[in-house]
Image (cartoon, grey):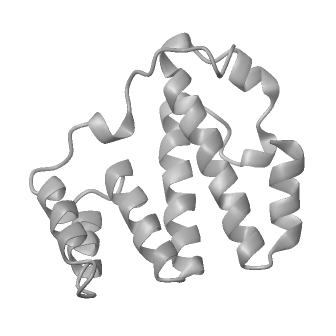
Amino acid sequence: MDLLNFEAQGLYFEEPDVVGVKEMIANASENYATGNAELPLLKAYFLAPESLNVLIALNRLFYYQHRLEDALNATLKALAVIRTLIGFPEDWRDLQLSHINNAPAHSLTQVRLYLFTLKAIGFLNMRLEYLDISQCIFENW
């Protein structure tokens, strides 16, 4: 499977969300500068805890606020959501190249998102000085 040669399909941000979630994310974006972005995102999370739109918005909010543990938790949740979409192992340490090579062509966008999210987890662990986990992620993936 060529991870660089593909036509993007099934982008997470194009997926429909529970009614009102898109507006809550937009409201959070509009209110970021005033410090009032978290509440709309948390409301969106309670409505749609499996929404990658919400989880990625939470990751960004927490990351830019330097709340790295919270960003890591949102990112781990996103990885779990993506994992179930593509049938990857529950623990990323059990991921083999064969999982990627044997993934259906229509799921290539989700495979790339999974790997990008795993990279973000490695980066957040590095920033938090959880260097053993970070090193394991970067050495293996």
Residue 26 seen anywhere in this rendered image of the structure: yes
Report x, y in % for residue 90. Answer: 65, 45
Q: How many marks?
A: 0
Specify whether 14 is left or right of 111. left
Residue at 48%, 33% (x, y): give it. 85
Query: Which of the 4 image quadrants contains residue 5?
Result: top right
Residue positioned most to the bottom? 35
Q: Which quadrant of the figure has residue 124?
A: bottom right
Residue 9 drawn at (x, y percent):
40, 21
- The C terminus lies in which quarter of the figure? top right
Q: Is residue 102 above or below residue 45?
A: above
Q: Quadrant of residue 127?
A: bottom right
Q: Is residue 39 left or right of residue 84?
A: left
State left or right for residue 115 relative to residue 140.
left
Is residue 58 or residue 66 the one in the foreground?
66
Q: Nearer the viewer, residue 117 or 102?
A: 117
Q: Nearer the viewer, residue 122 or 51?
A: 122
What percent of the width, then of the height, locates residue 3? 65, 22
Q: Residue 93 at x, y = what percent? A: 80, 47
Can I make out residue 51 in this image? no
Residue 137 vertical placement versus 8 (above, below): below
